[in-house]
């Protein structure tokens, strides 16, 4: 990913760490030595105050005075020499105090002439910097009003060397810390970017109108709150798209509906009157025969009654189908566009029709196919498949085999229903979808067909603005219809 947040986190964190370390290193280099000198100066002042306080007290000649100065010298690396009013040595520190006796006498009597830099002069002391050989010192000497003389010295070069060593060590540690911190933040940031990448994947699926993926977050932080809102947005979009597709489908039908209504009414009345004429004539003839007692035996009368009842049932079935077809053609039956798995629909119907195929000794085969989600009216899609499958059962012959397959074609899926048997005459293929058209009228009437089933298929498919058709194959007939496939379902 070109602009990865994870990479930015690592780079920003490493940059900030490196910047802070460089700033600290610069400040140490520029000011640490001065800070140390000021700190040492403060320590010398504290030792000076201690000597002045003790000189004015009764503990000056006791061992406590020496122990207190020993403690200051050992703790702060200070060399001290103290003389009384008679220039007799009263105290020298264990870390080179004897060397300062001669220098203190020279200061008192004014014959020391070494190079010094006076930093501050008080009423009874002088603070200065001086060099002795290769070494440089911070030094204070003076004579108190009680006559006590003192000198204190601490080395400066060791301070500078310590500062340089500390800065170099700090630079090494800083580089290692920056690298280690960058690596750690690289892996730690994965916990932050992982849910963001998951949200990106879900939103990408939403772009393709696939709303199955949901965000599962447990931390209850800001990212999880965003994920919950995206889940709600996904559900809202799915409802809105379903409503929009339904409304769009209805709008397309309304445009064509007005022009076809009058013609459909005329055609409907003509076809109904033609199809009802034969069963009505049969019912009337057999009823008259019963009235006139053409055959008086009970067996004949029972046969006449069965014919009348059979024709009446066929008329009732045909009227029901005509009412369904009428609602579809006149747009009184609302088409609800839904998202569903057409594979599951086909499998469920084949399973429910198992008794029918067994009674007719027919073998049903269906190609393996995973879930395929489509946009269509689920109830009407099942009715289309039912009509195809019923026709396949009634006209199946030869090997008595029905094959079902689902074929993906770009953004559509084609459902194929094939049955072995006699092919349909070429001149009849274009008329199959007309109401009451029958290729083999004797056979259609034998199983009670009305010639309306494929007209219902036509009306349903056109109400959903989808394609349908029929093809002759060398060993049988293939009926098919297409549906709009949900993006990303394959």
Image: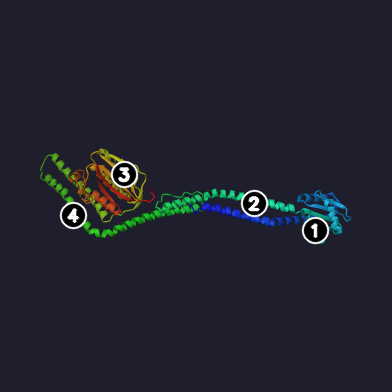
Tell me residue 18's x, y (percent).
Answer: 60, 53
Give the labeled residue for mark 4: 270
Where is mark 2, residue-wise? 171
C-alpha distance separating marks 1 and 2:
36 Å
Nearest the viewer among 293 and 436 is: 436
Residue 146 seen in this snapshot: no
Precedes in sequence: disc 1 or disc 3 = 1
Structural distance between the alpha carbons of marks 4 and 2: 100 Å
Classed neighbour count for the residue bearing mark 3: other residues with Cα under 10 Å, few (<14), some (14–19), many (≥20): some
At x 24%, y 54%, the residue is: 326
Residue 8, percent from left and from top: 53, 54
**Which residue is painted at 15% across and 43% down in the image?**
304
The numbered mark, 1 or 2, whose residue comes first in the sequence reads 1
| Crowdedness near tag 4: few (<14), some (14–19) or many (≥20) residues, C-alpha within 10 Å | few
| Callout 2 touching callout 3 (CB < 8 Å) | no
Mark 3, secondary structure of its residue: strand
Q: Could you say whether the residue bearing mark 4 is in a helix, strand or loop?
A: helix
| Image quarter of residue 149 | bottom right
In whole angstroms, how far apart are the C-alphas of marks 4 and 3? 38 Å
**Residue designated by label 3:** 405
Work out how far the residue at label 1 is from the one at label 4, CA to CA, in angstroms: 134 Å
* Residue at disc 1, secondary structure: loop
Relative to the observer, which residue lies in front, 61 or 129?
A: 129
The answer for how far apart the CA atoms under marks 1 and 3 are is 108 Å
Q: Nearer the viewer, mark 1 or mark 4?
A: 1
- The label on residue 115 is 1
């Amino acid at each position: 990913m070109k602009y990865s947040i994870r990479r930015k986190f690592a780079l920003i964190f490493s940059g900030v760490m490196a910047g802070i370390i460089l700033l600290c290193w610069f400040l140490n280099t520029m000011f640490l030595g001065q800070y140390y000198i000021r700190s040492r100066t403060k320590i010398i002042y504290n030792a000076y105050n201690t000597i002045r306080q003790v000189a004015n007290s009764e503990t000056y000649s006791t061992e406590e005075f020496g122990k207190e100065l020993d403690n200051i010298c050992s703790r702060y690396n200070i060399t001290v020499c103290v003389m009384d009013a008679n220039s007799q040595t009263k105290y020298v520190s264990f870390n080179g105090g004897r060397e300062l006796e001669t220098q203190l006498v020279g200061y008192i009597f004014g014959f020391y002439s070494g190079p010094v830099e006076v930093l501050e002069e008080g009423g009874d002391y002088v603070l200065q910097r001086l060099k002795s050989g290769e070494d440089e010192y911070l030094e204070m000497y003076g004579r108190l009003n009680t006559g006590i003389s003192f000198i204190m010295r601490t080395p400066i070069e060791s301070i500078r060397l310590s500062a340089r060593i500390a800065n170099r060590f700090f630079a090494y540690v800083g580089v290692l810390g920056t690298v280690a911190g960058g690596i750690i933040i690289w892996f730690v940031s994965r916990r932050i970017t992982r849910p963001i990448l998951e949200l990106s994947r879900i939103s990408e699926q939403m772009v393709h109108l696939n709303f199955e993926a949901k965000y599962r977050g447990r931390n209850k932080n800001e990212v999880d709150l965003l994920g919950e809102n995206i889940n709600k947005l996904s559900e809202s979009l799915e409802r809105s798209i379903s409503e929009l597709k339904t409304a769009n489908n209805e709008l397309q039908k309304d445009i064509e509906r007005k022009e076809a209504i009058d013609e459909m009414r005329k055609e409907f009345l003509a076809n109904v009157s033609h199809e009802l004429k034969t069963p009505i004539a049969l019912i009337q003839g057999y009823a008259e025969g019963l009235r006139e007692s053409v055959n008086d035996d009970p067996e004949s009368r029972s046969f006449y009654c069965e014919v009348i009842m059979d024709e009446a049932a066929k008329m009732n079935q045909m009227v029901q189908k005509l009412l369904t077809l009428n609602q579809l053609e006149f747009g009184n039956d609302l088409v609800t566009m839904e998202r569903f798995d057409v594979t599951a629909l086909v499998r469920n119907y084949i399973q429910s029709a198992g008794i029918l195929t067994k009674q007719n000794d027919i073998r049903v085969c269906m190609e393996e196919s995973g879930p395929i989600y489509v946009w269509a009216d689920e109830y009407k899609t099942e009715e289309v498949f039912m009509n195809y499958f019923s026709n396949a059962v009634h006209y199946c012959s030869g090997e008595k085999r029905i094959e079902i397959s689902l074929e993906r074609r770009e953004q559509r899926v084609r459902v194929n229903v094939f049955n072995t048997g006699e092919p349909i005459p070429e001149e009849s293929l274009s008329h199959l979808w007309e109401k009451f058209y029958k290729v083999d009228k004797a056979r259609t009437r034998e199983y009670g067909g009305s010639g309306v089933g494929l007209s219902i298929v036509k009306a349903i498919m056109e109400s959903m603005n989808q394609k349908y058709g029929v093809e002759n194959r060398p060993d049988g007939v293939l009926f098919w219809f297409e549906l709009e496939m949900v993006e990303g379902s394959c």
